[in-house]
Image (cartoon, coloured by chain):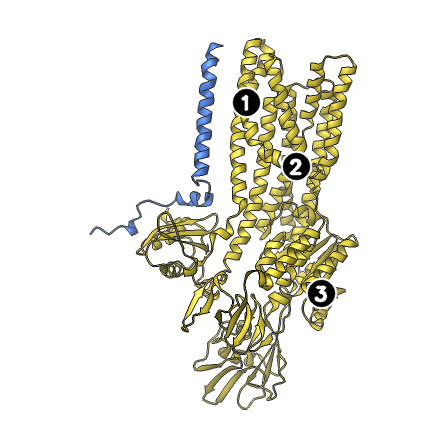
Amino acid sequence: MSGLLYLIPIALFLGLLGLAAFVWALKSGQFEDLDGAAQRILLDEDEPEDRPKAG
Amino acid sequence: MSSTLSACPLPPAAAVAAEPRVEPTPFVRVDPKSGRHRLDLVVEGVHCAACIRRIERALAKLPGVEEARVNLTTRRLAVAFRGDPTLADRIVATVEGLGYRAVPFDPSRLEGADAVAEKELLLCLAVAGFAAGNVMLLAVSVWSGHFVGMGEATRTFLHWFQALIALPAIAFAGRPFFRSALAALRHGRTNMDVPISLAVILAPTVSLVETIRAGEHAYFDSAVTLLFFLLIGRYLDRRARGAAREAVTRLLALRAQAVNRIEPDGTIRPVRPESLEVGQRILVATGERIGVDGEVVQGRSELDTSLVTGETVPQPVAPGSRVFAGTLVLGPPLEVRVAAVGEGTLLAEIVRLVEAAEQRRSRFVALADRVARLYAPFVHTLAALTLAGWLLAGAGWHFAIMSAIAVLIITCPCALGLAVPAVQVIAAGRLVKGGTLVKSATALERFARIDTVVFDKTGTLTTGRMALEAIEGGTAEDLEAAATLARTSRHPLARALAAAAGPGPAATGVEEVPGRGLRRQGPEGTWRLGRRGFAGPAEDDGIPATELWFERPGRPPVRFRFADPLRPDAVEVVAALRARGLEVELLSGDRTATVAEVARRLGIARFRAELSPTEKVARLEELARTGRAVLMVGDGLNDAPALAAARVSLSPASAVDVAQTTADAVFQGTKLAPVLEVLEVARRAERLVRQNIALSIVYNLGAVPLAVLGYVTPLVAAIAMSTSSLLVVGNSLRLQLGGRREAAAAATASARPVGAAA
């Protein structure tokens, strides 16, 4: 019983953390282009064609 | 991986070349904070990661470009750059060089209150979801406690925690419902949100009192879960419609145009039509749409006014003639003086007519709200009776109030609130696949109940583009020979001729005589293709006609006759509409003879021609007065007020802007079949909505006796409510399943010869 006294607040705090993360994501425009995000994951950061060719 | 990326086929370059270019420089804005230039483009043809990379990489290489980002969902490209604003030209050229069509637009015109409301709903949804999960966790502990003998102290402790989460969450996430309920009450109406708000407010209030009294039952979880479910329905519904509106504005943005202003020093400068002032002069080239209302200063030409008046025969114009925005120059270029901007334009006049017609139209009440009008007083009376009954029977105040509240909670139209959005989201999704965008909330319900279909002619029943109808006094060989000349011209009739002949060679040394025709000096003499008098019969009777004459030395002249052809499936669609028992009527601004001919070919008995926009509205209001529920299908500027006056309206994607924004739904493509599909889907959706409402009412009423008798605990309420919601959502999904079965059936049917269907 006494465990609940701190376990529930901890659980709630973690939940709130998740909610805050979601609100941040919403505000920072992470949900503006869902299709684009799904496709962009296929892009390589270091495309060989764009680098100056070494040798 | 790289093979999947490079597999993306480039859009054909022809698609880029076919449309007139829009000058991007007038659309460049300066960001006041960073001092950078910003340009927003709608890009057609992007659909994969390779497209994104191709565009972003190419732009990043341009000197001065600091940021380029493609949004694949909205098909927009945002570019930030420093330096000369005319760099915009190179940006557009670069994107078009890659094979994508890029059109600049003004983002402030596209982003409205919609996006803000959608974000608010999503935020409410997140808060309600968080609260629902956590409150339910604690509620389940309490329910289990009933069986294992949880002590009063622990239970009250858990109740307090639930209150701590639920109360602020409900206050925050319930706002969309509270607002709508308040607005309805203020106007002396009730809607579905009134009983919802009442239950969502009363349940936690009573639970709070119970918690303070260290009582046994608290309904925090019911209230929060209810809110969560309803927000899901509402969010999906808004998103589906937001996506439709977004798609329509994107289609419109793709047609944005700049006008060529003639500066005092004679130079030509592309500017946005909005920046023009009365008295300034613009130059309109052959094949271009006039961007303003004005008066011709110089040049004689012919105008295609079909989008404005519905008339198909080209109108001759000369210096002094009034011309309107949206008309297409067929003949030689014109110099036009701007005669009106803003409120004084024909467009503004039409918009006023649209608004007036919308105000006169009787307000349509959504089915769910009609049900709520009966349902809400019923359950509220029932709750009051329960309270009174228990008090009379001698039960204590506490028990009587708890039972009355239980009645309110169990009858809360949770499933009722989901019954409509669930079906509408699925129906809208199905229609989008067929190219139809449903924009307004109650449109599907209104589509389902119509008994009359009123069509506009030009651009709606017909394609709105000239096509070769007949060759008089010639053969296919003449067509082929004429086409070699026609392929060199941008004149719409020449283009129609070239299109009829199909791909082939173009002649060299062709000379275009503006407003007359094409001429080519050949080895055996002069070939001429053009209007009467230039080629063919010498006399020019001055009557504008949709014809071209072709003359070659030593041969009789050949006459090519053009007409605005019917949409390929117009005959079948009109027949199918009549087979469903719908009245079909034709209202057109075109000449009587042309309209009568189209009506005869389609088998439409009732038609009216040469109507002005106000006369169209008057006819629709007359139909409404005789009790008809009318679907109006139209595309022209002159149709827009009629679209607003009808019970429900539909417009093709080729329609003028104001028609598309007025219409309840927009369909794409050259076929008329979407009209049938919309009606079919709407009817099935309506059936499902009714089933859903019946289901949830029966379900709720079944639980009422339990609540009245005081047997409903929070556990029972939670189970009852979630099962009824699941039932309703499950039933709505049948629209998807049924669609697939039907599509399979249709595929087999279409495999049969066409004659069998007619």
- Residue A28 lies, in percent from the top left, at 42, 39
- Residue B280 lies, in percent from the top left, at 48, 69
- Could you say which chain is coloured yellow in the image? B
Relative to residue A49, is residue B157 depicted above or below?
A: above
In this rendering, would B500 be left or right of B76?
right
> Gap between marks 1 and 2, in whole Å?
25 Å
Helix, strand or loop status at disc 2: helix
Q: Amino acid at mark 2?
A: Ala
- For label 1, the crowd category at 10 Å Cα-Cα, with few meaning under 14, some 14 to 19 and many 20 or more, is many
* Towards the viewer: B374 or B35: B35
Between label 1 and label 3, give the one nearer the viewer.
1
Extreme-left residue of the structure: A55
Badge 1 and badge 3 in a common chain: yes
Read off the residue under disc 3: B602
Q: Amino acid at mark 1?
A: Val
Q: Amino acid at mark 3?
A: Leu
Q: Which mark is residue B135?
A: 1
The disc numbered 2 marks a residue on which chain? B
In this rendering, would B385 be left or right of B19?
right
In this rendering, would B339 be left or right of B417?
left
Read off the residue under disc 2: B419
Residues at marks 1 and 2 touching, judged by CB atoms closer than 8 Å: no
Residues at marks 1 and 3 touching, judged by CB atoms closer than 8 Å: no
Relative to residue B231, is residue B409 depicted above or below?
A: above
| Residue B601 in sight here | yes
Q: Which mark is residue B204?
A: none
| Image quadrant where residue B41 sits | bottom left
> Gap between marks 3 and 2, in whole Å?
39 Å
Residue at screen point 56% across, 49% down: B244
* Towards the viewer: A14 or B547: A14
Between label 3 and label 2, give the one nearer the viewer.
2
The disc numbered 3 marks a residue on which chain? B
